[in-house]
Image (cartoon, grey):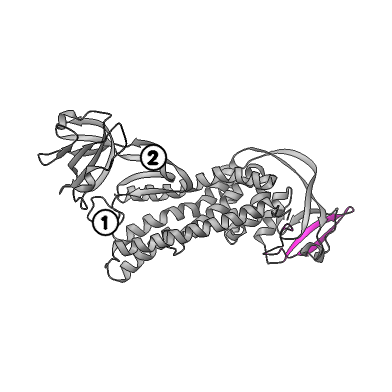
Amino acid sequence: METAFIAIIAFVPMLVMLVVNHEWGHFFTAKAFGVKVLEFGIGYPPRAFSIFTGRTRVLLDDNTQYINLPGVAAIHPGLRVRLQTAEDASGNLVARVVEASQSSGRRRQSSLHDMGSDEYLQHEGTIKDIDPESLVVADMVYSLNWLPLGGFVRLAGENNPAVPRSLAAKGPGPRAIILAAGSLVNAAFPLFAFTLLFMIPQSVTVGQVQVEEVVANSPAMAAGIRPGDLVLTAGDRTIEHGSDLVRATTLNAGTSMDWLVEREGRTEIVRVTPRVNPPEGQGATGIRIGLVNLRSETRYEPPWTAVWLGTTNTWEIYPAPWALPQVTGEVTRDGGLRGWVVLSILFSINLAILNLLPIPMLDGGRLVFVLLEWVRGGKRIPADREGLVHLIGFVVLLGFILFITYNDIVRMVQGGSPLGG
């Protein structure tokens, strides 16, 4: 129960960080390709909090219509408005409709929805500045939402190429880059995280890892490991903390590795093969461990060394992103900041891979439709058909997530987290 609680407490800020990283990838690449970003959201609606930012200039002309406003003279800084805008030959946004949002009472359906506006950019925001020929509006909203299941970046015209500055108006190449950018940021996160971790001075408690218990018929027993043994190295890794051994065995699951152990003052090399799918509560090798001969040290590396260590650690950890379930509780509980960062790296890699899978509603599912468009010589799948596929995929994916989450909670509550290496 304690391990489950610690894992959940560590997971919440970690998930927020990784989701924000992912969405920043979509956000910055969309802006780089000239796609209008309407919202950057953490969680899913209903909306709990929002703030409008940015300075988008919108031209006014004789064809601009005003709703809930007598005219341009009634527009003032701070006014909340909804807009329909077109794009002129010079690439400027020109207001076709400006509607003042209702500030009191139940929020009603906007009149813009009744005006046949599929070819216009629909956005809303707060007036920052106004003159007779144009207005400046803060129309990019950062939102915090009540359903903490992830995050999103809402782009203009995601399925409608007629909308000005829309995602759908871009070619397959830019759209593919924008869709894949979130996963690419998650994939690059390990290099940044490891490098930063090695550069920051940390007071760490280290010592010698001692075997306290060996489970019968386990890989450790088969290798001759005994209670009281001190594990000095595992593979090419020096073992100074329980999280070091957890990581070493997890990354080498299914393959033999040499352990250097000290027993009664003598050292000995034993060959251990960590299990890929160990029985509940036994860990990859079937031992329970403790830390003895404790000491405290302050450790950090210069930037050039940190970059190299970050690169090598990233290269090492990529072959085993599926190791996440085996290290979640133990690394978080015993590994301090370093363990938390390693855990976030594993989550980030899994998030990158998951989002690129060809599953409807995920980035990979959308990339499939972009690929089909390219194969078909630019002929698009109708937006309504693509939307239906994504909707079905979302329902199936949500059910799968709920099922997995329920099983994980039950497992953690029952104490099914691995103990030791």
Residue nearest the observer in this picture, 381 or 388: 388
Q: In the rendered structure, which segment of residues is drawn in magenta?
A: 256-283
> Disc 1 designates what residue?
160
Q: Estimate the x, y position of residue 40 in percent, counting from the top left.
A: 39, 44
Q: Nearer the viewer, residue 3 or 340?
A: 3
- Residue 410: in magenta span: no
Q: Which residue is mark 2?
A: 142
Q: Are marks 2 and 1 in contact (CB under 8 Å)?
A: no
Is 382 placed left or right of 71 in the picture? right
N-terminal of the two: label 2 or label 1? 2
User: Residue 411: x percent and y percent?
Assistant: 66, 55
Tally the marks. 2
The outermost residue toward the front is 106
> Left or right: 227 with respect to 109?
right
Residue positioned 34% across, 50% down in the render: 30
Name the residue at the bottom extreme.
376
Which secondary structure, mark 1?
loop
Q: Position of residue 309 (x, y in %)?
A: 60, 50
Residue 91 visible in the shown view: no
Provide the secondary structure element on which disc 2 rests.
Answer: strand
Amino acid identity at mark 2: Tyr
Please state the horizontal and vertical placement of residue 130, each as a whole percent of the image: 20, 30
Q: CA distance from mark 2 to mark 1?
A: 23 Å
Q: Residues within 10 Å of mark 2 (few under 14, many from 20)?
A: some
Specify whether residue 260 is painted magenta: yes
Above or below — where is 20 with respect to 125?
below
Q: Amino acid at mark 1?
A: Asn
Residue nearest the viewer, comparing 330 with 395: 395
Residue, far right: 264
- Packing grade of label 1 (10 A; few <14, some 14-19, many >=20) is some
